[in-house]
Image (cartoon, helix red, strand yellow):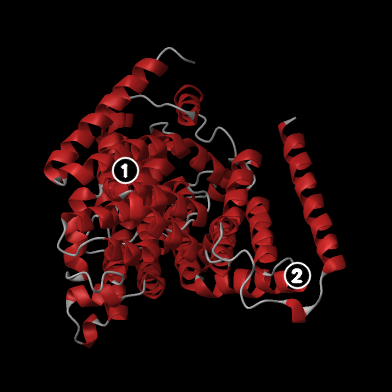
């Protein structure tokens, strides 16, 4: 019945699109009638395509068609319902631009997939799993180890998601931790830790938008860290949830199935399980996993610095400010891949033929993530054509006029909605930081709080959105069905978001992070205690 409902809904939507196309063909007046800007530019309609795609993905549990429908809708709106213009926008401004703009990340994904296949074939993952069985004795220990590794890898969120997933998946599997919980732990440490780490690709991106504030980019970023309540309280939430040994919402079912039935997936596991079947070398050792990962970390950092100009004479901070992760990460990954192949062949745990076979295996494993990332990026491009940034700027200017005392909380909400709708945290703070810095007095503490609220809201919306690249990478890293990851993470992210919103309401009046942060911590722990009491008797 469930499959029939999906097919019915998809058929109805597809028919509506065909009818819509037929209608606009009948009334299209040709290229001469096209305007320089679409009639829906910088209006609420700019947010409709991503909202439709997200709603369909959550309802139908089918992400590809949902994203494509959102792209097509955005194409028609941006072309004023002209079918020829819509097709041009979908192909050129949407899909082709998405592929060209994210080609570096595609390369990085394929190389990471190839390295995982190499390490699995060499027996490194199996050896690490055997080691973990003797050193990590409990589910709590396995979850804490995943959390700590996620916090330690703070250079880049893509790198964090895939590396933590590859290393910890054998450990969490052995302790019957569901893939949905693994994906949550990966996602909940990836973006938040990057957003509070001064040496990260995120800090570099934020620095680009802070000119004219009276602070250097890194200085403003560092001063904003204590007020980044969503990122900091997410860590408190994870630690408390692990120690209290309970779950709520859809995650509870996934964890119950994992613990009682050994079912790590609950649903959507067929393709993932087939992709993971490997004949591992029994001679593999833990060093066969640790060394490639360490090489990858070191070379990726050097790659980011090289692309940023560090070796051309720029200082460390400037190099990180100028780097491009879509170039630096593939640069480091391909060097790490070559070193890993040479090392494993020299160790005689794999042959050259097996090493070469790992490359297409890595590509195959990452195809779902690449497809979702392509469609999600194309959808973001459609919102750009429709002037979503200008629409949000107008809303912020309107809010600033009459709601000055509530601006930090409003900025947080706007950033959440924008990041959720567009699926991009970088795009969100890229749009909002110039607006926020123009609203507040450069000498005011409210400027720091406002920037922090913007960054926190961007991470929050990024966590909640099915079309976020970090969410997609977390699903890939945890080898979890993407919609399962989104639906199980959503209640957790919303809980922390509501607590953060309350703290930002207080921030306009208190303006002291060392008072506000303890309040947020108490609210987070107290909220989880209440939820546990309310849900403990429910099956």
Report the front residue among 263 and 459: 459
In the displayed structure, does residue 239 sit left or right of residue 271?
left
Tell whether label 2 touches label 1 (CB within 8 Å): no
Q: Quadrant of the N terminus?
A: top right
Q: Residue furthest right?
A: 26
Q: Quadrant of the rendered structure where residue 72 is?
A: bottom right
The residue that disc 2 covers is 82
Report the front residue among 321 and 87: 87
Q: Residue furthest bottom?
A: 312
- The residue positioned 45% from the left and 50% from the top of the image is 417
Q: Quadrant of the rendered structure where residue 293 is?
A: bottom left
Badge nearest the viewer, 1 or 2: 2
- Looking at the image, residue 25 lies above or below residue 529: below
Could you tell me residue 473's position as x and y percent?
Answer: 46, 54
Q: Residues within 10 Å of mark 1 (few under 14, many from 20)?
A: many
Report the front residue among 364 and 382: 382
- The residue positioned 63% from the left and 70% from the top of the image is 38
- Mark 1 or 2 closer to N-term? 2
Report the front residue among 525 and 418: 418
Residue 190 shows in this picture: no
Q: Residue furthest front?
A: 402
Could you tell me residue 226's position as x and y percent?
Answer: 18, 49
Could you tell me residue 318's position as x and y percent?
Answer: 21, 77
SS of the residue under disc 2? loop
Q: Quadrant of the rendered structure where residue 247 is?
A: top left
- The residue positioned 56% from the left and 56% from the top of the image is 44
- The residue positioned 82% from the left and 51% from the top of the image is 15
SS of the residue under disc 1? helix
In the displayed structure, does residue 47 sit left or right of residue 6?
left
Which circle marks residue 146 in the picture? 1
Q: Residues within 10 Å of mark 2 (few under 14, many from 20)?
A: many
| Separation (CA) of disc 1 from disc 2 | 50 Å
């Amino acid at each position: 019945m469930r499959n029939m409902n999906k097919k019915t809904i998809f058929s109805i939507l597809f028919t509506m699109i065909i009818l819509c196309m037929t209608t606009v063909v009948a009334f299209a007046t040709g290229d001469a009638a096209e305007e320089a800007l679409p009639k829906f530019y910088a209006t609420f309609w700019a947010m409709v395509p991503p909202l439709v795609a997200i709603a369909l993905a959550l309802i139908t549990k089918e992400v590809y068609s949902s994203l494509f429908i959102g792209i097509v809708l955005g194409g028609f709106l941006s072309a004023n319902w002209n079918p020829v213009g819509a097709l041009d926008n979908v192909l050129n401004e949407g899909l082709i631009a998405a592929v060209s703009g994210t080609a570096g990340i595609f390369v990085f994904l394929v190389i990471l997939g190839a390295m995982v296949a190499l390490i699995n074939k060499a027996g490194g993952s199996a050896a690490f799993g055997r080691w973990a069985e003797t050193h990590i004795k409990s589910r709590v220990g396995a979850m804490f180890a995943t959390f700590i590794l996620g916090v330690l890898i703070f250079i880049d969120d893509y790198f964090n998601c895939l590396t933590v997933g590859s290393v910890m998946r054998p450990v969490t599997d052995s302790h019957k931790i569901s893939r949905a919980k693994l994906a949550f732990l990966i996602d909940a440490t990836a973006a938040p830790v990057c957003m509070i780490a001064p040496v990260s690709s995120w800090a570099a991106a934020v620095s680009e938008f802070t000119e004219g504030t009276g602070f250097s980019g890194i200085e403003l970023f560092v001063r904003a860290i204590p007020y980044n309540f969503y990122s900091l309280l997410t860590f408190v939430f994870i630690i408390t949830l692990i120690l209290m040994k309970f779950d709520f919402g859809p995650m509870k079912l996934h964890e119950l199935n994992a613990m009682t039935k050994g079912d790590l997936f609950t649903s959507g596991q067929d393709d993932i399980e087939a992709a993971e079947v490997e004949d591992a070398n029994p001679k593999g050792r833990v060093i066969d996993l640790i060394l490639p990962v360490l090489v990858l970390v070191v070379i990726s950092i050097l790659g980011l610095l090289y692309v940023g100009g560090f070796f051309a004479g720029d200082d460390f901070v400037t190099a990180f400010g100028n780097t491009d992760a879509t170039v630096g990460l593939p640069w480091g990954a391909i060097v790490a891949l070559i070193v890993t192949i040479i090392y494993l062949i020299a160790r005689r745990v794999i042959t050259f033929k097996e090493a070469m076979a790992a490359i297409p295996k890595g590509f195959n494993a990452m195809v779902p993530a690449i497809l979702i990332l392509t469609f999600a990026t194309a959808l973001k491009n459609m919102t750009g054509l429709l002037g979503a940034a200008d629409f949000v700027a107008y809303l912020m200017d309107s809010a600033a006029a009459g709601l000055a005392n509530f601006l930090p909380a409003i900025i947080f909400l706007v950033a959440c909605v924008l990041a959720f709708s567009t699926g991009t945290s970088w795009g969100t703070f890229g749009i909002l930081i110039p607006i926020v810095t123009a609203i507040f007095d450069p000498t005011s503490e409210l400027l720091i709080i406002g920037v922090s609220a913007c960054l926190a809201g961007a991470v929050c919306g990024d966590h909640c959105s099915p079309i976020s690249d970090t969410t997609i990478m977390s699903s890939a890293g945890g080898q979890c069905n993407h919609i399962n990851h989104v639906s199980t993470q959503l209640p957790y992210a919303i809980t922390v978001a509501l607590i953060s919103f309350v703290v930002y309401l207080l921030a306009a009046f208190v303006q002291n992070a060392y008072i506000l942060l303890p309040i947020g911590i108490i609210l987070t722990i107290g909220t989880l205690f209440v939820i546990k009491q309310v849900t403990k008797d429910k099956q």
